[in-house]
Amino acid sequence: MADYYDLLGVSKDADGDTLKRAYRRLARQYHPDINKDPGAEDRFKEIGRAYEVLSDPQTRGRYDQFGEAGLGGAGGMPDVGDMGGFADLFETFFSGFGGAGGSGAGRSRRRGPQQGDDLRYDLKIDFEQAVFGQEREIKIPHLETCDTCSGSGAKVGSGPTTCTTCGGVGQVRRATRTPFGSFTQVAECPSCEGNGQVISDPCGACAGQGVRQIRKKLRINIPAGVDTGTRLRVAGEGNAGLRGGPSGDLYVFLTVKSHPQLRRDGITVLSEVNVSYLQAILGDIIEVDTVDGNTSLEIPAGTQPNAVLTLENKGIPKLGNPVARGNQRISINVKLPIRLSDEERGLLEDLAGHHSAKGRQHHHHNSGLFARLFGQKG
């Protein structure tokens, strides 16, 4: 899926007016009633979808932080994988005629400031860190503007010179003869790579690139409630832009380590606990593990096997709204003894007789024995 900012040709910090102007210009260019080229209608729909998302501050914020996943499954968008090639071909064709089809814009984008690349950083965090959030320090390798040449790429005291191959245009024309006639093909200048300028005396610190690879320390804030796959955007911490262009962004992709006793389902924490058959029958108060540490849990008398008990507000904070917190659901496993002592067996046999029609007539003889058995709970 193409980036919405790239679709509209704007930077990630563009304001509402800039978005609107970009959308109107592109909408006129690709409107099906005006543009009959193949793929123009699909591009028109993509531009409309991008503007719909970015023009709303709420959906734009979710898109900035979480990408397409933050929009709640806005599927059904057409595949735009081949549109870039077609757009380049369209632009190159008209540039040969000096028309208003965008050739000048294409060259100015190439020769002018270019935004730096976005970067991805994968970070593994503990279960508790995902629940409550944390500030973390990370080290990332990225490109920063060379401070020796201030990003120009030229040695101090010199500067770029006009490319002699293309005369500073950034493009060269080649005539091609075919059975249908002679055609002029416009291509990027191989000497200056479309920049229109070359650096004859490059900066020694960055080898003429204008940027250098630096390993930088960053402190990032992990909000409460994140999960595996959550993407955090750190604006401006990607690679530096070329020729004075803005830096790209850093995207931190999180992976949450598993917990030995706890699992999560959305904002609900799931766990299990084992109790004896006597605890299930008579009830008890036990200690259970939660994300907040050990907590007392009451096992009601008569708890059935596989019953589920709930601890309210012991779950995961809701991402973006940590005040809203889920619950913990605890499944009760009732453990039956595999081996019994002779005394326990005798007591249970008496109890079984007590629950039969015949045994109920003599239950008063066994009351002391039953008390001894159930006094062993826990």
Image (spheres, rainbow, N blue to C red):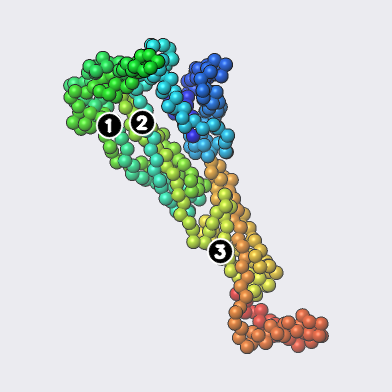
What residue do we see at 68% from left, 85% from top?
A: 347
Front in this rendered view, residue 225 or 110: 110
Query: CB of mark 2 within 8 Å of CB of mark 1?
Result: yes
What residue do we see at 58% from left, 63% from top?
A: 272
Is there any visible trace of residue 119 in the rendered image? yes
- Quadrant location of residue 96? top left
Q: Which residue is mark 3?
A: 288
User: How far separated are the C-alphas under marks 2 and 3?
Assistant: 50 Å
- Quadrant location of residue 31? top right
What residue do we see at 70% from left, 69% from top?
A: 302
Neighbours of disc 3 within 10 Å: few (<14), some (14-19), many (20+):
some
**Residue 340 at x, y percent in the picture:** 61, 83
Labelled disc at residue 116:
2
What residue do we see at 24% from left, 18% from top?
A: 165
**Residue 103 at x, y percent in the picture:** 39, 16
Q: What amino acid does circle 1 point to?
A: Val
Determine whether 307 is above or below 115 in the image. Answer: below
Determine whether 206 is above or below 95 in the image. Answer: below
Among the two numbered marks 3 and 1 on one chain, the one whose residue lies closer to the N terminus: 1
Among the two numbered marks 2 and 3 on one chain, the one whose residue lies closer to the N terminus: 2
Front in this rendered view, residue 36 or 364: 36
Neighbours of disc 2 within 10 Å: few (<14), some (14-19), many (20+):
many
Determine whether 224 is above or below 206 in the image. Answer: below
Is there any visible trace of residue 20 in the rendered image? no
Q: Which residue is mark 1?
A: 211
**Residue 174 at x, y percent in the picture:** 31, 17
